Amino acid sequence: MVMAEAARQMLDDIGVDSSRMSLQWASAAEAPRFVELITGYVSDIKSKGALGTGENEADASTLRRRLDAAVKAAAGRKPRTAFGMLAKKLGKDNDYSPEAIAKGVKAKVIPGFRALRIAEEVKLCLEEKGGLDAADLCSMTGASSEEMDKALADLAKKKHVSEDNGRWSLV
């Protein structure tokens, strides 16, 4: 359940309607239930329309870029470490309630994931568009100005980006 909640919150972060994801259990002995679950899920997804057309979803090209950035971010050390530490804490507290899981994911996993996702997306935006200012990057990534300042500083420190007259570009 912790992994499913992390996936839901990550989808929300990148602008995908998290109700597009479903996790249901059915044993091998429950073939009719399995068919019912899959049929219902497919029907629900069809009613939502194509990815990027749903209510409160980012447009398809933005989602494509954010999904690419999110895949790289999710593989990063910070989110994986935070996820492991959260799993340990939940076990130690013996509290696997949906509320504790959601709260823990939001506080422990998502901040590191979001920071990495924004940094990866900045690189993709700069690769796609060339020199951009911080405000453009905020608009494209959905980052706050504080998040963008931190991402750009970290990327510049690692010599991935450089700034010239307020415009950022890849090194």
Image (cartoon, rainbow, N blue to C red):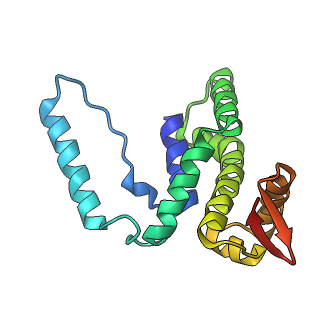
- Residue 114, horizontal then vertical, whole percent: 67, 53
Work out which residue is located at the far front of the displayed protein and give it.
171
Q: Quadrant of residue 136?
A: bottom right
Identity of the residue drawn at 51% across and 45% down? 7
Question: Front-most of 164 and 157?
Answer: 164
The answer, for residue 160, to whether it is visible in the render is yes
Q: Report the label total.
A: 0
Q: At 66% across and 24% down in the image, what residue appears?
A: 88
Q: Quadrant of the C terminus?
A: bottom right
> Most extreme residue toward the left, as rendered?
32
150 vs 66, left or right, is right
**Where 110 sits versus 76, above or below?**
below
- Residue 93: quarter of image: top right
Camera-side residue of 77 and 54 = 77
Residue drawn 39% across the image and 50% down it: 21
Q: Is residue 44 above or below residue 74?
A: below
Regarding residue 9, the answer to whether it shows in the image is no
Camera-side residue: 99 or 64? Answer: 64
Image x and y of residue 126, in percent:
67, 66
Residue appearing at x 72%, y 73% in the figure: 131
Of 92 and 16, which appears nearest the observer? 16
Answer left or right for 48 relative to 101.
left
Q: Quadrant of residue 138?
A: bottom right
Q: Position of residue 166 (x, y in %)?
A: 84, 76
